[in-house]
Amino acid sequence: MRSDALYVPRMIVARSHAGLGIGGKLLAWVSEKAAEAGRHWLRLDAWRTNPHLHAYYLGHGFRHVRTIDLPHRGSGALFQRAISAPS
């Protein structure tokens, strides 16, 4: 069965390029690809102890789904946003 979500793994922008809008452009591009693939959700997980990163994703239309705390992982703050149909 095909998933209704596209997952973004390990999205990272070099700190030397912070503030240039690269992250937003990457999210827009992957959202287009998700729409073309007929997916309904874009999902990612972030470092659970990084509130600035959480705020970044919230500011890009994501909603916090839950945070899981596994001792062997630093990530675990799960976010998703809806994908609109391609135009």
Image (cartoon, helix red, strand yellow):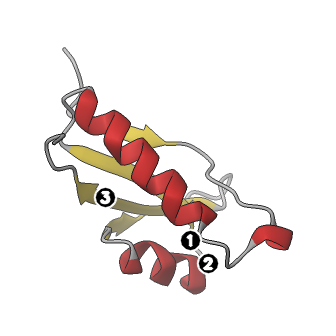
Give neighbour class at mark 3: few <14, some 14-19, many 20+ (Cα, 10 Å).
many
- Residue type at mark 1 is Arg
Residue 82 picture location, percent across and down: 20, 55
Residue 80's disc number:
3
Q: Nearer the viewer, residue 15 or 50?
A: 15
Label 2: which secondary element:
loop
- Residue type at mark 2 is Thr
Cα distance in 3D space between marks 2 and 1: 4 Å
Residue 63's disc number:
none
Q: Nearer the viewer, residue 42 or 65?
A: 42
Cα distance in 3D space between marks 2 and 3: 18 Å
Taking 11 as reference, is 41 left or right?
left
- Residue at 26% in and 30% down: 36
Residue 59 picture location, percent across and down: 39, 80
Residue 68 picture location, percent across and down: 45, 62
Q: Residue furthest right?
A: 16
Residue 46 picture location, percent across and down: 55, 63
Residue at the disc numbered 2? 49
Label 3: which secondary element:
strand
**Are the residues tagged 2 and 1 within 8 Å (C-beta)?**
yes
Residue at the disc numbered 1? 48
Q: Nearer the viewer, residue 72 or 16?
A: 16
Taking 73 as reference, is 15 left or right?
right
Give neighbour class at mark 2: few <14, some 14-19, many 20+ (Cα, 10 Å).
few
